[in-house]
Image: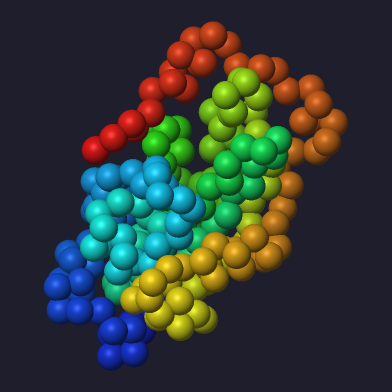
Amino acid sequence: MKKIIFDNEKIGLSEKELEIFSALGTPAAIQSFVSAIPHNFERNGDSCMSVREVLAKRRAHCIEGAVVAALAFWVHGEKPLLMDLVAGGGDFDHVVALFKRNGCWGAISKGNHAYTLYRDPIYRTLRELAMSYFHEYYDTDGIKTLRAYSLPFDIRKYQPEEWVTGEDAWTIAEDIGKVRHFPLISAHQASSLREIDDIERTVAKITITKR
């Protein structure tokens, strides 16, 4: 795998920040680090914090955790890639950080449901990876809502202050929705999906409430 150059003189991480990311040399370590950050429930309003803000405030939701993970991969010579998972019916979308091992895709994911978390690098295509989230991705009415996934979104093209060292990462959040997306199911398939069972509804109530 060809190493991607990470030039911290251009990025501007502090010595302490660089030390943190330098220790995250594997996907497992990155996921453990992201999972240990308390969940951001946006009690003070919508947010999309930069990496530096996440480290300082010690909280993150999905896209905030994804940009932290993406930066960790970049520090270690891999592309900082995101993937957008789009839900229908007013349900929440989800963003993950992508990585590849031996030709297969995996994902680092920050969520407050167990089924929206890490994916091992065993998926041959991005569609396979996205579909791994499908069955358990349902709303409070028990309707399966996942509908589309995006191409890999390389965030090296953005200035560091737009997602690493600045006050927010809203540009990333807005632009990821504009890249090409692919449907996971057809309209006919969506109309015939079965609602989840009662036991699944019970499991769905298991969430991270605070940390």
Name, please, the residue furthest toward the top: 198
Q: Is residue 119 visible?
A: yes
Name, please, the residue furthest toward the front: 44
Using the image as rendered, state which of residue 111 and residue 134 is in the foreground.
Answer: 111
Using the image as rendered, state which of residue 37 and residue 85 is in the foreground.
Answer: 37
Name, please, the residue furthest toward the bottom: 9
Q: Please name the residue shown 64% across and 41% down the image.
A: 87
Q: Position of residue 44 (x, y in %)?
A: 40, 50
Q: Quadrant of the C terminus?
A: top left
Residue 190 in the image: above or below residue 111:
above
Left or right relative to 91: residue 49? left
Colouring rule applied to residues = rainbow
Q: Please name the residue shown 51% across and 66% down the image.
A: 170
Badge count: 0
Q: Position of residue 90 (x, y in %)?
A: 67, 38
Q: Position of residue 130 (x, y in %)?
A: 58, 45
Using the image as rendered, state which of residue 154 and residue 65 is in the foreground.
Answer: 65
Quadrant of the image occupied by residue 150: bottom right
Q: Quadrant of the N terminus?
A: bottom left
Q: Position of residue 17 (x, y in %)?
A: 20, 71
Q: Please name the residue shown 30% across and 51% down the image.
A: 59
Residue 111 in the image: above or below residue 10:
above
Left or right relative to 169: residue 56? left
Residue 109 in the image: above or below residue 178:
above
Q: Is residue 79 visible?
A: no
Q: Please name the residue shown 33% across and 31% down the image.
A: 209
